[in-house]
Image: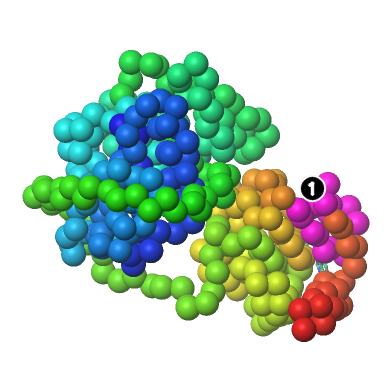
Amino acid sequence: MVLIWAEEKEGILPRSTLEVLSMGKKIAEPLGEELGAVLIADSNRAAGTLGKKGVRKVYAADDPALRDYRTEPYTQIFTSLIEEHHPSILLLSHTSSGKDLAPRVAARLNVGLISDCTQLDLQDGSLVATRPMYTGKALAQVTLPAEMNPKIFTLRPKAFPASEKEEGGECEVIIVEVPQLMARTEVLELKKTPKGSLDVAEADIVVSGGRGLKGPENFEIIEELAQALGAAVGASRAVVDAGWRDHKDQVGQTGKQITPKLYFACGISGAIQHQVGMRNSKCIVAINKDPNAPIFKLASYGIVGDLFKIVPLLTEELKKIRD
Ligand SMILES: Cc1cc2nc3c(=O)[nH]c(=O)nc-3n(C[C@H](O)[C@H](O)[C@H](O)COP(=O)(O)OP(=O)(O)OC[C@H]3O[C@@H](n4cnc5c(N)ncnc54)[C@H](O)[C@@H]3O)c2cc1C
């Protein structure tokens, strides 16, 4: 069986899960294996969607105590499920929870894990993963020993197409006995992002601002441009460290690594640590007053000039087009 973790948010499967799902399906079919999914917490709505998208078995651990991700109980559930059902492959998204959980499960089971894959190919019946190394400067092709089961992979969000087709199938829901939870941690509070604001890791367009904005109040022009484009607002570490923006918006080595279709870098120099997070964007637009700023070496389109003039002009023109 090819098993995926169907991470869900309040009963809805986010795009990152649909990407894992489509890859799971793509692998399971030629291997002649069944596609299964693990659903933890609110399973009712999400199980129906999984069935329609080709999952045949859903292992559901529906316990209110598991509603928020915690490393220890989730590791226990995955470990015992794998020991009982022996899947050959386990796929997770490389989300913050996925990259926390996958190595734990791999270590418990003494099996291999290839993390942050940007491509998965079946070659002569074995899976070959492509993953970036040395902060994205090289791409490595990696496999796991054939006898090792399960082989675990985490998939970089937005590097794979999302499953869109609904085939109307039904899936069997198998209720998983939740083991006596061995949690030494407790979730005290969850701070939700305000409704309507997009996550930089999920958005197709990201408009990021850096120290060139001079102060947090000037992010207003970035937000306006983002709104005109239906984009998420990102930030460099310099402005996050200065307390102008939240860490969840940070793009880069110690922030989020994103691959939007369109990325705007406004007043961002393009330090290597920032590049790590956005260099795989399909199209990069840089606005900087310094023609020698490193960001221009990456940019598909470069605008040399004062962002305080250029950004509002862009917003104005975009609004005209939209209207
Ligand atoms: C271990 C480590 C991890 C790191 N992780 C990250 C990370 O995840 N993400 C990240 O971003 N950084 C990270 N950094 C920090 C990184 O090295 C840079 O310091 C940071 O990216 C700089 O942010 P910036 O481009 O906003 O600021 P600056 O480098 O100060 O650049 C500001 C830019 O704004 C331009 N500018 C100024 N005024 C205007 C104007 N009016 N109009 C147009 N342009 C203007 C300037 O020409 C300049 O290029 C990390 C560093 C280390 C050591």
Amino acid on which the number 1 mark rests in the picture? Leu
Q: Residue at 65% x, 69% y: name it.
A: 231
Is residue 244 shown to the viewer in this render? yes
Measuring from the top left, give residue 189's x and y in whole percent: 30, 71
- The secondary element bearing badge 1 is classed as helix
- The magenta stretch is 283-300
Is residue 237 shown to the viewer in this render? no
Q: Residue at 47% x, 36% y: name it.
A: 26
Task: Report the colour scheme.
Answer: rainbow
Q: Quadrant of residue 104?
A: top left
Q: Quadrant of residue 9?
A: bottom left
Report the front residue among 299 and 122.
122
Q: Is residue 159 magenta?
A: no
Q: Residue at 44% x, 53% y: name it.
A: 166
Label 1 belongs to which residue?
Answer: 298
Q: Is residue 284 magenta?
A: yes
